[in-house]
Image: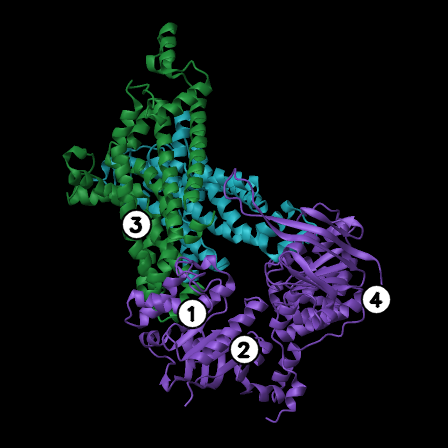
Chain colours: A purple, B cyan, C green
Amino acid sequence: MSLLSIQNLDLSIHGNPILNGVSLDLAQGEIVAITGESGSGKSLTAFSVMQLLPRGTVTTGSIKLDGQEVLNAPDPEMCKLRGNDIGMVFQEPMTALNPLKNIGDQVMETILLHTNQSRDEARKRALEVLARVGLPPESYSLSRFPHELSGGQRQRVVIAMAIALRPRLLIADEPTTALDVTTQAQILELLKDLVQDFGMGLLMITHDLAVVSDMADRIVVMRSGEVVETGVTKTLFANMQHPYTRALFAASAHEVNLPKAPEADDALLIVQDAVRDYPKPRTTLFAQREYTRAVNGISFTLHKGERIGLVGESGCGKSTLTRAILGLEPLQGGSIKAFGQEVAPDMPAALRSGLQVVFQDPYGSFNPRHKVARIITEPFHLLDNPPQGLERKNRVSDALLAVGLHPDDADKYIHAFSGGQRQRIAIARALIIRPEVIIFDEAVSALDVSIRAQILDLIAELTQTHDLSYLFISHDLSVVRTITDRVLVMKNGEIVEDGATQQVFTNPSHPYTANLIAAAPTLPDVKALSNVPA
Amino acid sequence: MRSRNLIIGGVLSALVIAAALISFLWTPYDVTQMNIPAKLQTPNGTHWLGTDHFGRDIFSMIMVGARTSIAVALVAVGIGMGVGVPLGLAAAARQGSLLDEVIMRGNDLVFAFPSLVIAILITAVFGPGAVNAIIAIGIFNIPVFARLTRGAALPLWQREFIMAARVAGKGVSRISIEHILPNVTNLLIVQGTIQFSLGILAEAGLSYVGLGAQPPLPSWGRMLADAQTMVNFAPHLALIPGGAIILTVLGLNLMGDGLRDLLDPRIRVERT
Amino acid sequence: MLRYSLKRLLSLAISLIIASLVIFLVIEVAPGDPASFMLGMNAQEDTLNALREELGLNQSKLERYLSWTFGMLQGDFGTSYTYRTPVAQMVADRLWVSLPLALYALALSTLIAFPAGIYAASRRGAPGDVAVMGATQLGVAIPNFWFAMILVLVFAINLRWFSAGGFPGWDEGLFTGLKALTLPAIALALPQAAILARVMRSSLLDILNEDFIRTARAKGLSRRQALWRHALRNALIPVLTIIGLQFSFLLAGSIIIEQVFYLPGLGRLVFQSISQRDLIVVESVVMLLVFAVIMVNFIVDLAYAFVDPRLRSRS
């Protein structure tokens, strides 16, 4: 009998149907991954097992844990199961812990709640569990508070809480999505180990097919609240039945057709020994300001037609560098020159108009109170004689057409558009004054894979039609690999490697780069798989 | 639930405002007209809400008193918004700067002077009057709006659409007016309604202790002060102005809650 | 923790200095010469001068400010223009009424608001919540001095449980004193309790939406356990701010409430002094009130650090 059996699960919230006939099984010691894009209902499926659902949720069907029905079980009964028989790990380690309680108390709470152990016994057990998840007592005492730990360390604490009582089933909802790639690799490794050691079942939710292929014994692919395909990982990848699975896989592995960069020597952007210090928050009126060095002596040059990638993990200083290049914040040392002139917060509008940017968040990068036309013409502010009347209208139409939208969209408000369309609007805003250089700041990181593939194609297409040179900043190696000619690898405010993209990826010279590449999960080679008999 | 708050609150507020406006043109009786023989009547056909110890018509006094309350509270909110919002915008635009520090410390300092204390100081120097009440309540409103505006503006400055505006070469003040202000307006409307109701309570309190509107200008607070010695044999003198204050404040608060739910359910109103 | 406290202490000192400057300057602007006010219209010029000398009115503004502030530091608040007695003594007597009243009201307000707020939050949307919220909506709208009049009408005049006003003094015993302050304290506390209960509820509901509450539920805590063990302490942070602010409202409010109950507190002293143009008394009482408010905010700041470990370790 399977450990977890979900049969025909229907779920609606306030009358809106979300899940439709979801069924899946999970055996002891097995790792099953539910994957799909946003809106597929994968997380709600997981939360249904915990019976931790939003208000107004109605469910029908059956969810059995070792034969015991948990769907719509009374809460006191579920409280006995949660933490004891089912553990759960969440997506956001930064907010998953109570900021006011130390980690020891939080881990011990699980133990004290479900067993009759004394506080001393519970403390001993908590120390063991924390050591097991990689937080040994020598360096991580129980009296530490969450804010003293990094994201990866907090995720380990959450895992410790979830496995403290060796539950039969562990549920992990996008457990590594908020983490850096090297931390992700460690956490995934830990989860795999724990499953093996404890013989638990692991139900894992992730949008990342590469993670799935590394981890899961079996895969469940979901779309719009339905299971479209399910099977043993290798077999499923070797023999994808459903067109959606194939499309998802293709989008994840998507490589754009980047036209060859033109040979040119004109340096558009020269960054020379750039130093950027960040003031720490002022604590009192008269205290001496303290600074952290976020960018420490960075130099590189962007030539006309070049497409440079800048990769690094969070906190490496890439966002700070971006803001300096855009002339939003002053440098404390070195210089940045664009088109021969110094970039600084007070630089002339004409210089600014040569540098435009596309940001990450398709939901945060527009004033919700403005219409599309007003949004994308905002850079006209930089022109001495901004186009008026018909010319302005034509420029707006051209920009919208260039990014694959319709000229009529100019009169709509931003909330009428999906995430992918919004990112097209952001690109239109950057294009409209025909800048020499565009900075893509994590421009596809918030998008689902299929949308991401489309936007990447659009960027590749625009390099041809609009003569684009760009700096593409991302934490995602697979994206940088396909969309750039040259790549800079950044760590702790410094560039540790600079080389042609293919060269760096196939033969990295710096150990950090090698680490990053090794840590990044990769999609299976479908062709190789199909030769394996199912 | 949502629209119910808004409707009840809106109707109550509209009634009070209408009474105040109509009082400019017409009141059942002249509020300065004493009529000792008709004194201390309980509500009846000729005097709908009765008469006071001088025989003045209470309904007329309530109407004119509404005028005083609304005028004082409205101007005080205007002062608070007019000064506080620009200060808050400026502080947020230059977060962490000396300007921000000075504005915020100044705010903390003003918070140490409850409006009654400010009124006491002003009255000690210039003598009592409705204008002093306005200034006292207005000054106290400044830090309320400055803090609220700064608090709401700070996260906006981190949003990417503000970065985009800066990349488009727009300056700090232009961004504050074009992008920040419209995005905090809902919040200001809601808080403005709440401060308006608090202003009416404060005006009543100041008039009650003689620091607000002076005779012969009728005001709800002074009607209550007059009623105090007679409350045992003419309770309607206290109940009616008190009821007027409660209904007005209740109406404005309900409207504020309703507006908040309507405009943005995420807005948190500080009520202090 | 120590550095945090020291910093708060420094900003407390700065606030006090600026506040004293503001008060001093405002009173300075006041028209009229206290000496001629005290001696009447027909006083001789040399008598006036002698009095000015005695009161220190002939000194420069700076000297007067410094002697005022340093005097206060040593407990010397100057001499009343009207009564020719030390202001410190007058104020101290009155403070023994006003301060206990404000604290009494604060205690009542907290005692009512916490259970009400927690109850409403734990039953969000249920009839109990709706009833509590409706009551607080009404409570917020009631002017405290009007409520005081109604309390007098019901409990003093009709039921005769309490006296309608006056204060027998603490010499009559703690119970008698507290009994005399009970109606005023209730009048002050109820509207504030309504506000505090609303803040408590909304703060709790905010926290109950946080991720770490879901984590706590995933451990097997019931909704109630999660509220008590994880949400309450987190919700306390905004509630503390409001309690701090409320103290200043209660202190100011007590000035008004004293009028209703004929209590010999700071309020009575202040209104008397204003009408007698005894500005030095007004100045001292206002400074004292502001001092109390700033002190309470300082204590609230320290309380934050007690509740929140992030503040303890930062700085």
x and y, in percent, of residue C270 in the image: 32, 29
Residue bearing mark 1: A160
Confirm whether circles 3 and 4 share one chain: no
Q: Residue at x 20, y 34 (%)?
A: C166
Q: Calculate the distance from the C-alpha at mark 2 to the C-alpha at mark 4.
A: 42 Å
Q: For residue A318, what is the image quadrant? A: bottom right
Residue bearing mark 3: C110
x and y, in percent, of residue C202 in the image: 39, 57
Residue C104 position (above or below residue A199) = above
Residue bearing mark 4: A262
Left or right of residue A182: residue B139? left
Mark 2 or mark 4: which is in front?
4
Confirm whether circles 2 and 3 share one chain: no
* Residue B123 visible in the current orientation: yes
Residue bearing mark 2: A40
Q: Chain letter for mark 1, please.
A: A
The amino acid marked with disc number 2 is Ser
Q: Chain letter for mark 3, please.
A: C
Q: Calculate the distance from the C-alpha at mark 3 to the C-alpha at mark 4.
A: 73 Å
Q: Which residue is drawn at 31% across and 53% down?
A: C113
Few, some or many residues within 10 Å of mark 2 (<14, 14–19, 20+) = many
The amino acid marked with disc number 4 is Pro
Q: Calculate the distance from the C-alpha at mark 2 to the C-alpha at mark 1.
A: 29 Å
